[in-house]
Image (cartoon, helix red, strand yellow):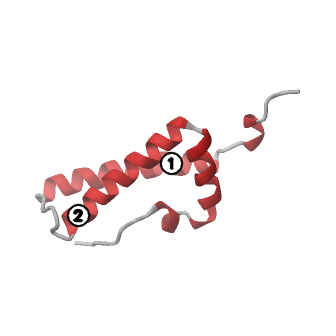
Amino acid sequence: MSNTPHELAVEFPEHVALMRHLKETDGHFARLFETYHEVNRAIHRAETDVEPADDFHIVEMRKKRMQLKDEIYGMLVHHEPEAETPPV
């Protein structure tokens, strides 16, 4: 089993500033970000036997992490900064 932590800053280094901004300004993104890290930490604990889990549970957690990561990435690449500026 892999025990690489898969932190979002490592996965998407080119989007670190945008992730920080979205965590502060977009509640949905902030919830996804936090949920991703909760699942990611649980996977890491299971893979390193800190909190052992059966293979089925680990696979399900990995699927959840991938779904969250895909949604987060979609928000990062489709972010439109001008949409946050109120019209004058």
Residue 61 percent across, percent down from the top left: 26, 52
C-alpha separation, residue under disc 1 versus residue under disc 2 = 22 Å
Label 1 or label 2, whichever lies nearer to me, is 2
Q: As drawn, which residue projects farthest toward the front? A: 24
Is residue 64 rendered to the left or right of residue 9?
Answer: left
Q: In the visual, does 46 lie left or right of 79?
A: left
- Where does the C terminus fall, quadrant-wise? top right
Which mark is first along the chain, 2 or 1? 2
Q: Give me the residue at 20% from left, 57% from top.
A: 58
Residue with the most extreme top position? 88
Left or right of 21: which side holds 5?
A: left
- Residue type at mark 2 is Arg
Along the line of sight, the residue nearer the viewer: 36 or 61: 36
Place residue 52 in its image quadrant.
bottom left
Crowding at dot 1, Cα within 10 Å, few <14 / some 14-19 / many 20+, comes out as some
Q: Nearer the viewer, residue 84 or 55?
A: 84
Q: Which mark is residue 30?
A: none
Residue 67 visible in the snapshot: no
| Numbered tag placed on residue 45 in the rendering | 2
Q: On residue 72, which mark appears?
A: 1
Query: What amino acid type should be assigned to the residue bearing mark 1?
Result: Ile
Give residue 84's quadrant in the image: top right
Tell me the SS state at disc 2.
Answer: helix
Q: Position of residue 48 (x, y in %)?
A: 20, 71
Between 60 and 47, the one nearer to me in the picture: 47
Q: Secondary structure at mark 1?
A: helix
Q: Is residue 11 above or below residue 35?
A: below
Residue 66 visible in image: yes
Q: Give the image location of residue 42, x and y in percent.
A: 26, 57
Q: Position of residue 17 (x, y in %)?
A: 64, 58
Which quadrant is the N terminus positioned in? bottom left
